[in-house]
């Protein structure tokens, strides 16, 4: 399908998921293929709109990945073209895909309604089965979003794996991370959710608070395409109102191409899955992850898949002339 010529202005919105914030561009005609300079200008917090990344909502048919995405799910007619704040292309963003779904609702492209089967649940502890909802094409495959009765968006993030395999699982690590100010690197575990993560556990919350993430951590061996680094402190387990055992942890994250952010959806999944792996077979399947921007819920699903649930907010929208953001 050939895109139509661009108009002089285009619709945009600003949204966030647990304060991981994004500029959202509606490109319904497939004519707004942003370059790296435009993304950097849009994401600039002083001269642009400001955000941790830029998301372009575009018909899947206009994307180079269309054949693969539509073969996976013909209903994935909308694609989340996600760029980091530095202009680099990213495979996926867990908070971003929830905000993408809220944006699609705001545009009237989809009506997700809500899932009403959460009887007896509190806001965060349950992860019931539900209809597939909105199918979203991404560079990491198709993601399915549903809306819960509490207003949260839940995303089946698809398969995950440990790049280091069984040896990494047995050892508990397959990488080393150095943070500015630390005397020596510390062991960490690589987790892949379609994008790369390296998770490092700390013993105390005060050490988490003191960690200097103003500079990018050094990871060894160095991943070929970079990695997101999550620092986590496990906080134990609690029992929800329905009797489900739920793990809890606190996390900070340095995102590749962005820096430290107040939340990272795929990072929260990676952190929960790493702590679950370290805990062994008796570890809970459901985890609450506290990030500086709020709390999200991660659920390990059958078949090696994982679900992420949390809030998504569209805070304002208008029209812009993208030519003004060309440098």
Image: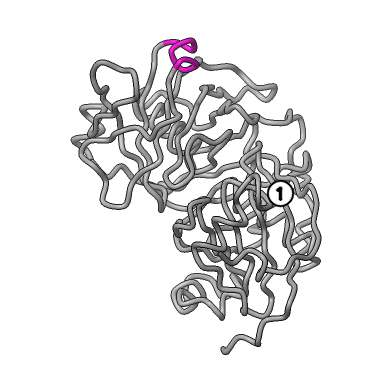
Percent position of residue 5, x then y: 65, 87
**Direction from residue 201 to residue 171 in the image, left or right:** left
Q: Position of residue 103 (x, y in %)?
A: 73, 58
- The magenta-colored residue range is 204-210
Instruction: From the top left corner, tell me how far across and down residue 74 is, in percent.
Output: 56, 75
Position above or below: 185 against 223: above
- Find disc 1 in the rendering and name its residue: 15
Q: At 48% across and 27% down in the image, what residue appears?
A: 284
> Which residue occupies 67% across, 51% down?
99
Residue 205 lies in the magenta-colored region: yes
Q: Quadrant of the C terminus?
A: bottom right
Instruction: In the rendered view, tell whether residue 260 sits above or below residue 182.
Output: below
Which residue is more in the foreground, 139 or 286? 139
Task: Categorize mark 1 by other alpha carbons within 10 Å: few (<14), some (14-19), many (20+).
Answer: many
- Taking the image as shown, residue 194 lies to the left or right of residue 260, namely left
Residue 258 picture location, percent across and down: 49, 44
Which of the two residues, 164 or 323, is positioned nearer the viewer here? Answer: 323
């Amino acid at each position: 399908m050939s895109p139509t010529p661009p108009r002089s202005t285009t619709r945009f919105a600003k949204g966030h998921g647990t304060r991981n914030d994004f500029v959202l561009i509606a490109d319904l005609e497939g004519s707004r293929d942003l370059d790296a300079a435009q993304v950097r200008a849009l994401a600039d917090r002083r001269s642009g709109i400001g955000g941790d990344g830029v998301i372009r909502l575009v018909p899947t048919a206009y994307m180079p990945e269309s054949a693969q995405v539509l073969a996976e799910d013909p209903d994935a007619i909308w694609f989340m073209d996600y760029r980091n704040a530095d202009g680099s292309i990213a495979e996926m963003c867990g908070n971003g895909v929830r905000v993408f779904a809220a944006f699609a609702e705001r545009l009237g492209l989809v009506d997700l309604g809500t899932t009403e089967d959460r009887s007896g649940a509190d806001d965060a502890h349950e992860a019931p089965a539900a209809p597939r909802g909105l199918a979203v094409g991404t560079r990491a495959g198709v993601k399915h979003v549903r809306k819960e009765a509490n207003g949260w968006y839940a995303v089946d993030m698809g398969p995950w794996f440990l790049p280091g395999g069984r040896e990494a699982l047995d050892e508990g690590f397959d990488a080393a991370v150095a943070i500015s100010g630390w005397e020596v690197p510390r062991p960490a575990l690589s987790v892949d959710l379609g994008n790369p993560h390296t998770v490092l556990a700390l013993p105390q919350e005060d050490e988490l608070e003191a960690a200097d993430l103003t500079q990018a951590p050094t990871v060894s061996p160095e991943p070929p395409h970079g990695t997101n680094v999550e620092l986590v402190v496990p906080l134990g387990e609690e029992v929800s109102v329905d009797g489900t055992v739920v793990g809890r942890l606190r996390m900070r994250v340095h995102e590749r191409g962005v820096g430290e952010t107040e939340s990272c959806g795929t990072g929260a999944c990676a952190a929960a899955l790493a702590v679950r792996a370290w805990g062994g077979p008796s570890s809970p399947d459901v985890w609450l992850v506290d990030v500086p921007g709020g709390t999200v819920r991660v659920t390990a699903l059958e078949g090696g898949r994982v679900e992420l649930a949390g809030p998504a907010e569209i805070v304002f929208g208008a029209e812009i002339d993208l030519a003004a953001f060309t440098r």
